[in-house]
Image: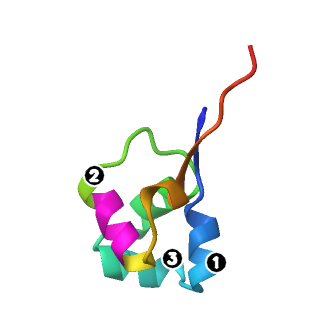
């Protein structure tokens, strides 16, 4: 998949656990875990906004586009 989710990297930089982030963004642990592992098919802008606010970062810090080789 050409979109890479770097949520785990940002969480490590901010020294915040999955449980803490889950409480701050009001998202279930399972849904946040799916996003963190890159298995999510979509993300709502409101969820992305809440995560960015909680981690004090930009969307590009969490989501990265990597072109797949032909």
Residue 28 in view (yes/no): no
Distance between mark 3 and mark 1 Cα atoms: 10 Å
- Rendered-image quadrant of the C terminus: top right
Query: What residue sits right under mark 3 in the picture?
Result: 18
Estimate how packed mark 2 is, as few (under 14), some (14 to 19) or many (20 or more) residues with alpha carbons within 10 Å: few
Q: Where residue 39 sits: x, y (%)?
A: 53, 45
Q: Residue sitting at 54 percent across and 84 percent down?
A: 16
Foreground mark, 3 or 2, reads: 2
Which of the image's four quarters has the N terminus? top right
Magenta region includes residue 23:
no
User: Percent position (x, y) of residue 54?
Assistant: 38, 78
Quick one: SS at disc 3?
Answer: helix
Q: Is residue 50 magenta?
A: yes
Please state which of the two labelled residues, at mark 3 or mark 1, is closer to the viewer.
Answer: 1
Which residue corresponds to the image point at 43% horizontal and 38% vertical from the top-left? Answer: 41
Give the camera-side residue of 55 and 30.
55
Q: Which mark is first along the chain, 2 or 1?
A: 1
| Rendered image coloring scheme | rainbow
The stretch in magenta equals 47-53
Residue at position x 28%, y 52% in the image? 45
Q: Which numbered dot is residue 12? A: 1
């Amino acid at each position: 998949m050409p979109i890479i989710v770097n949520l785990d990297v940002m969480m490590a930089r901010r020294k915040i656990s999955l449980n803490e982030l889950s409480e701050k963004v009001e998202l279930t642990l399972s849904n946040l875990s799916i996003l963190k592992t890159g298995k999510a098919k979509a993300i709502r802008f409101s969820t992305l906004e809440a995560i960015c606010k909680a981690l004090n970062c930009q969307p590009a810090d969490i989501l990265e586009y990597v072109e797949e080789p032909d």
